[in-house]
Image (cartoon, rainbow, N blue to C red):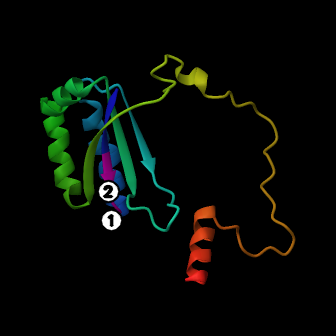
Amino acid sequence: MVKLIIFFRQPADVQAFEDHFAHRHVPLIAAMPNVIRTSVSRTLGAPRGEPPYYLVHDVYFADMAALNYALNSAQGRAAGADLMAFARDIVSLMFAEVWGEDPFEMGLGEKAVPEVTSGPEPAPPTSPAGATEQPKPAIAQEDAQNTQTA
């Protein structure tokens, strides 16, 4: 299995980007032949500051022949033209081979997702009394130690 990974940097106008992406671009991608599935990830952060990308769109295909066929199809050319029209300055693309056990690929689909039962909401995590600062990730702690000893 392979995927086309579309990386989007922070758009200048987030609302216009989100509207175009959801209502125009995603349907164009979905119309391409040979697409097995897609996923969209909105970044939350990075271990060392701001993430380089705002949004990542993965488009999965059986193999490179299927991906190339899709990109060269009329629907693929339309999706590419749209991408360059609305995100030329903020987009990067990559092809990747997918490894690992994918529950959808294994035919498990939704069975692999644990069933949610109704019940009381779990209590939010609590911090020790008087704590004012969240613990830093291990990488940030190492950076702070290296800065102090340098």
Position of residue 99 in the picture relative to residue 87 (left or right): right
Res 66 → quadrant = top left
The answer to if 7 sits in the magenta stretch is: yes
Residue ID at (79%, 46%): 122
- In the displayed structure, 41 sits above or below 14; it is above
Position of residue 131 in the picture relative to residue 11 (left or right): right
Residue found farthest to the front: 150
- In the displayed structure, 128 sits above or below 57; it is below
- Please tell me the numbered disc located at residue 77: none
Report which residue position mark 1 lands on: 13
- Looking at the picture, tell me which residue is in the foreground, 48 or 52: 48
- In the displayed structure, 143 sits above or below 11; it is below
The answer to if 61 sits in the magenta stretch is: no
Label 2 amino acid?
Phe
Q: Dot 2 lies on which element?
A: helix
Position of residue 16 in the picture relative to residue 67 (left or right): right
Q: Residue 110, image x and y in percent?
A: 56, 23
Residue ID at (27%, 44%): 94
Label 1 amino acid?
Asp
Mark 2 neighbour class, 10 Å CA radius: few under 14, some 14 to 19, many 20 or more: some
Q: Dot 1 lies on which element?
A: loop
Q: Residue 47, image x and y in percent?
A: 53, 62
Residues at badges 2 and 1 in contact (C-beta under 8 Å)?
A: yes
Residue ID at (23%, 28%): 64
Q: Which residues are magenta?
A: 6-11
- Looking at the picture, tell me which residue is in the foreground, 19 or 78: 78
Q: Residue 113, image x and y in percent?
A: 61, 28
Residue ID at (49%, 18%): 106
The N terminus: image quadrant: top left
Mark 1 neighbour class, 10 Å CA radius: few under 14, some 14 to 19, many 20 or more: few
Report which residue position mark 2 lands on: 17
